[in-house]
Amino acid sequence: MKKIILLLVIFYAVQLASQEKLGRPFFTGSANLTFGINEFYTIEPDDGEPLIVPAAIFFRVGFGYEFKRRIAISFNGGFDYHWNYATSAFPAYTSLKYNISEDEDDAFFAEISFGKMWRPSSIYPDGNYYGFGIGSQVAGEKRWHTIVRLDFHRKGIIGFKNNRLDSISLGIGFSFF
């Protein structure tokens, strides 16, 4: 009798463990807009110039794997265009995302990124890419989720102040599990 009860307990424990998902792959994409201080702004009233203007746009796509709904690793690529400097770049990077808090498929997260940035012109050499961001993932229909994020980007570009181009951007994107 003891052997049967022990066998049932082991069977039940294996059954519970097998129902827990260890992870899931995903596809992600986003568009970010960076804002900067308008160099033509004056304090005079009604001069017609806004203080803050859009300065750059970034497009990103990637794929990755989420482990136990808390940690995710992804491989990403994108296109960045800073129109106030007339410069563009193609970053390729790896990201590590950690869900700080979650409620079902909604999550608040922090993400760090590191990679390489390629330049399409010979004006500036290739450089490194670093990023840090926080955001919120909101569950949507079935497997689609909306992401709203605030990111800090650092691009190593010789010729800019301190040989880097730093920016803070606001983005919206999606993830598909």
Image (cartoon, rainbow, N blue to C red):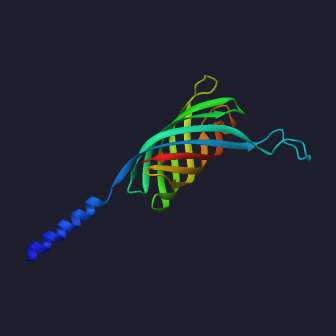
Picture coordinates of residue 31 (x, y %)?
59, 41
The single residue placed furthest to the front in the displayed view is 141
The single residue placed furthest to the bottom in the displayed view is 1
Picture coordinates of residue 41 (x, y %)?
84, 42
Point 60% across, 35% down: residue: 80
Above or below residue 143? Residue 117 is above
Left or right of residue 126, residue 70 in this image: left
Tell me which corner region of the image, top left, top right, bottom left or bottom right, holds residue 2: bottom left
Picture coordinates of residue 98 (x, y %)?
47, 55
Above or below residue 31? Residue 119 is above
Left or right of residue 71, residue 38 in this image: right
The single residue placed furthest to the top in the displayed view is 122
Left or right of residue 5, residue 163 in this image: right
Nearest the viewer among 63 and 133 is: 63
Nearest the viewer among 69 and 118 is: 69
Picture coordinates of residue 59 (x, y %)?
57, 37
- Is residue 81 something one can see in this rendering? yes
Point 31% across, 60% down: residue: 20
How many numbered marks, from 0 up?
0
Quadrant assignment for the N terminus: bottom left
Left or right of residue 13, residue 172 in this image: right
Tell me which corner region of the image, top left, top right, bottom left or bottom right, holds residue 58: top right
